[in-house]
Amino acid sequence: MSETYDFLFKFLIIGSAGAGKSCILHQFIENKFKQDSNHTIGVEFGSKVVNVGGKSVKLQIWDTAGQERFRSVTRSYYRGAAGALLVYDITSIWLKFIRLKYRDARTLASPNIVIILVGNKKDLEAEREVTFLEASRFAQENELMFLETSALTGENVEETFLKCARSILTKIESGELDPERMGSGIQYGDASLRRLNRQQQSGKKPDCAC
């Protein structure tokens, strides 16, 4: 039986090598920790249908390699992304590389891409190098949402994806994002929603069957 959904959003997971990006994706898709996690070679993929604000949304998620030698490969996946998780490891120094990845996302992805800063490995509090305040300040300065997660325990992992998806959906409903625009990273899954959107844009009332 084929999946049914109202919208499809293209998501990216970007950030430094070893930050736990693949583990976050695996925890979100499979609801368990990925024990045998190696560095991603190029790009990995996963998808999941979630309920966001009463709408069924399919998240198509591309997990990109964090190592610099794969940068030329992964940059091509930024195009047409609606949302991105910008992931760093709270137990290691991070700012220079995160700024580089953030700049790539702003330059290469959709102009209206929704980015959430994600501090992973929250379960390793005793080894923390990046304070919550420091990361919050970076998020505020760059107008990003921010959450800390643990791919090991699952804390805030699903909420991170939902928070990003809710923001995209709000922008669609306000007219700031247009799913019909090429490169938006958004597609309609339900044809009736597409028709309704076109009628609203043209100022027409929905067809009445009465």
Image (cartoon, rainbow, N blue to C red):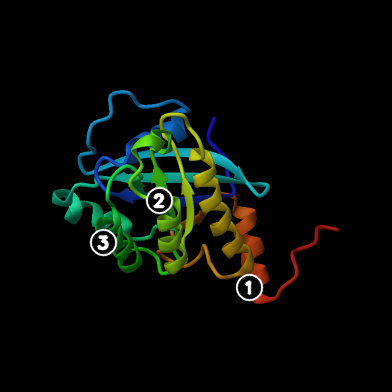
Residue 109 x, y percent position in the rendering = 35, 63
The residue singled out by tag 1 in the image is 201
- For mark 2, give the secondary structure: loop
Is residue 47 or residue 68 the one in the foreground?
A: 68
In-image side of 166 versus 84 (left or right): right
CA separation in Å, label 3 and label 1: 37 Å
Q: Amino acid at mark 3?
A: Leu
Q: CA distance from mark 2 to mark 3?
A: 20 Å
Say if 33 sits above or below 104 in the image. Answer: above
Query: What residue appears at the point 19 percent right and 47 percent down from the top-left corner?
Result: 67
> Total of numbered circles in the picture?
3
Left or right of 22, for residue 188: right
Sequence-first tag of 2 and 3 = 3
The three-letter amino acid code for the residue at tag 1 is Gln
Query: Which residue was labeled with disc 3?
Result: 100
Q: Which residue is mark 2?
A: 131
Left or right, 35 with respect to 7, comes to left
Q: Residues within 10 Å of mark 1 (few under 14, many from 20)?
A: few
Residue positioned 28% across, 45% down in the render: 92
